[in-house]
Image: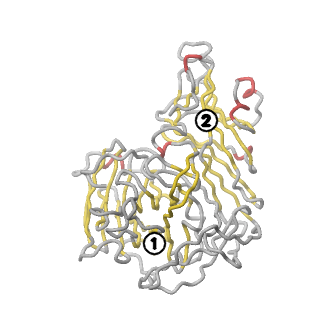
Amino acid sequence: MPAHAPAPRRGIRSTRSLTIIGTAALAVTAATLVPVFADDDNGLTLRPVADTTVTQVPQDGDTNVKTTLASCPALCDGNPRGRRDATLQFAVDKLPANATRVKAKLRVYAWHDFAARILARTVPGDLAAAGSPAQLAAVGSVQALDKVTKGYNEFDVSGSVQGNGTYTFALSQETYNTRVYWASRENSKDNLHPELVLSYETQAKPAPTKSTPSTALPPPPATKPTTAAPATTAPSPTKPATTAPATKPPATPTTAAPAPAGWRLVFSDDFTSGSIDRSKWNLRDGEGRSIDIGCNVDDPKNTFVSGGNLTLRALKQSSTCSSQSRQYTQSYLDTMGKASFKYGRFEIRAKSPNKPESSKGLWPAFWLRPDDGGNGEIDVTELPGGPGWHDKSTAAIFWDYTPVKQDTRIAIPGGGHPADGFHTYTTEWDAKSLKWYIDGKLVWTRDSTTTPWFDKAFNKPYNLRLNFQVGGWLGNPDASTRFPADFVVDYVKVYQH
């Protein structure tokens, strides 16, 4: 993001996924299923629907809408009746009926290291079922951590989450007689929010049903004949797989290229399988963030594979997410819990949707965030739309979101702009430097001489983020913004030495 631009309110494009396929936008007469076998890896990442601190201290007041949760033993900060338990309620409702070997991890963020032993208790039901120490003492399902670490702390709660239902988790502190603070669902930094990460296997695929939407999407560009796309694999019987909209823009087909000299390919998706590879990508669902105005949804109207491309589509349509009604839907993929990398060459070949006269408020990007949820961000490319923005790629790095950052806006080498066709955006990252390339030409470099916090920010594993947001600090759509808008990706590749 440009250095002269106003500071965004960011947990930028942050975290998590809910990988459940929705109903396709076009009426179909049949759906072709892609087989799913027992060793296929499916995943859900859920946010709490409610959380609070159960406290014995009247002075704490209403704890339902605070940005932090707290835990503390009965003797807390000198108060013999100072017990606090951090409680989080999750609604698990997207596990398919044929899910097996379900694994569940509760992840909660703490800002500091503490020599505190924490018990995670699972209570079937909502927050009211965990509203007192007596109720918690009766819980038999308990997981423990012997210390709290800065960043996300993980509790294996697989033994108590094996199917759909409402689950409340209570974090009770056994030792260290002062409060430990945890990030809540109301925290302004979206990348710190608690989450419940589920993985499972499926042995048979539920039969799909036909679905006809209330409105049909405009046809894809006439410059490219459309062909029926293979159906997206659907793990949920409530949201059957349907044929994805066909939208392959004019482009020269990409053939597999050898790895650049000195590099080996460690991650690749050419989007040729006909459906999103759920072993590589999470797809967020029902997520509304404070930094944009769209709902991240897992719906084949918004995210689909067709003709050898991945399309992230922004639509002007009403949707409810994070208890809010919004007027746009959008797409957000990440590799959290599936793939992360410390150093490498990160490359995407993609076509921006953003024309100067019709793209205000549209913002696709390919970027990286650290696994620990802490400081650091690497933006391989951001491609915001609208006059003054549509014609360049933004390369950026962040230390935090106050914001301490460095960025630059880069024209396409040789002329043109990101929406005139497919362009390749690359970032090479090693212990000494970060280098950005567009269409193979070096365009920007950062290292410890340009960036005082380089060594601290870029020395740990990062995961991939690929999203298309609507609105935000660069402005919201206006009457000229054209929907649907498609961010089309030919491939994503990661190389390492």
The chosen color scheme is secondary structure
Q: Secondary structure at mark 1?
A: strand
Image location of residue 113, percent across then percent down: 48, 33
Q: Residues within 10 Å of mark 2 (few under 14, many from 20)?
A: many
Question: What residue is shown with label 2?
Answer: 51
Q: Is residue 210 above or below residue 371?
A: below
User: In the image, what residue occupies the spot 51% across and 72% down?
Assistant: 310
Q: Earlier in the sequence, mark 1 or mark 2?
A: 2
Marker disc for residue 239: none
Q: Is residue 475 above or below residue 348?
A: above
Q: Secondary structure at mark 2?
A: strand
Number of marks in the rendered image? 2
Q: Quadrant of residue 202?
A: bottom right
Q: Which residue is nearer to you in this view: 236 or 354?
A: 354
Question: What residue is shown with label 1?
Answer: 489
Image location of residue 140, percent across then percent down: 77, 34
The three-letter code of the residue at mark 2 reads: Asp
User: In the image, what residue occupies the spot 46% across and 67% down?
Assistant: 483
Question: In which quadrant of the rendered image does the C terminus lie?
Answer: bottom left
The three-letter code of the residue at mark 1 reads: Val
Q: CA distance from mark 1 to mark 2?
A: 37 Å
Q: Which residue is nearer to you in this view: 325 or 120?
A: 325
Q: Quadrant of residue 28?
A: bottom right
* Outermost residue, front side: 479
Q: Residues within 10 Å of mark 1 (few under 14, many from 20)?
A: many
Image location of residue 70, percent across then percent down: 56, 28
- Tell me, yes or no, if residue 334 can be seen here: no
Image location of residue 193, percent across then percent down: 53, 42
> Is residue 176 toward the left or the right of residue 96 in the image?
left
